[in-house]
Amino acid sequence: MHRVVCLIFISTLTLLSAGCLTESFSPAEDAGIRLITPGDGISIFDGQGRYIGLIGEETPDVTANYSLGLVTIPPGNATATHRLIETSEFVYLTGGEAEIRCDNTTVTAREGEVVILPEGVLQSIAAVGDTELHYIDVIQPPFSSAVEVSGDELAEYTSGTDGVGTDNLPIVIPDPREGIEWDIGSDMMIYTLANPVLMPEMNLPIEYSVAYAELLPGGSADYNRLIGASEL
């Protein structure tokens, strides 16, 4: 018996709380629903990897307070050392194994694990092992070339300058099933991985929530409506 596994990102101008779900209602046509199909993507970091954008500059008609894409890095390759100024990065591994640098800390992450990198850290992500590294990458505020500092420009951002390079630690979420558990339908479970309102003790540097969902064959969620929020 196979499960359907997915990540759910909910974006809102105000932080998502548990009270945004309304009671069940009858389904209706909604012109706001959109299917986004991944394209071929672009080469990144001088051919070290490939990025397929799903939310961001590729979808100007989709309103979200983050950018989201799929990254593939072949074994032995890595993103160049860089900083993302005034943006945080959420990395969810869907395949392979990674060594992720965050200032002076390096963590190893595997399929199903999450690493959140605070804004401004000196970072790189390397594919280790014999298989390709695949991960979902979320950046908030949305990525643009203006926020990335790399190469010779890194010398301008020494430790403590402009609030960056102060040895920030990554946030590691090793098991999605250890999140807040919600039983919302038939043969379906949802686990909250990251939510700044429901998990204040984690000091999450994000303004969206992320949940991990599992559905058995034939499983479904009851109809619901999110008030003032979009869901991916």
Image (cartoon, rainbow, N blue to C red):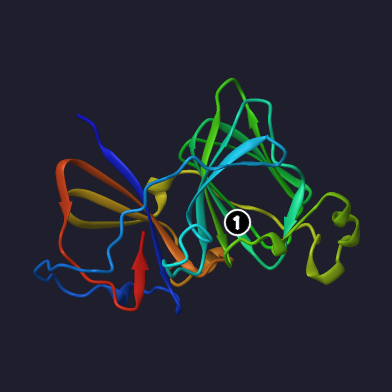
Across and down, in percent, residue 189 comes to 25, 50
Residue beneath the point at 68% across and 30% down: 77
Across and down, in percent, residue 94 comes to 46, 38
202 to 215, vertically: above or below: below
Quarter of the image where one finds residue 221:
bottom left
Label 1: element kind: strand
Quarter of the image where one finds residue 230:
bottom left
Residue beneath the point at 12% across and 66% down: 27
In the picture as drawn, the residue positioned furthest to the left comes out as 26
Across and down, in percent, residue 147 comes to 70, 63
Q: In the image, is 186 to the left or to the right of 40?
A: left
117 to 13, vertically: above or below: above
| Type of amino acid under label 1 | Glu
Residue beneath the point at 61% across and 35% down: 98
Question: Is there any visible trace of residue 195 in the rendered image?
Answer: no
Question: Is there any visible trace of residue 187 in the rendered image?
Answer: yes
Residue beneath the point at 84% across and 49% down: 151
Q: Which residue is mark 1?
A: 89
Across and down, in percent, residue 96 comes to 53, 30
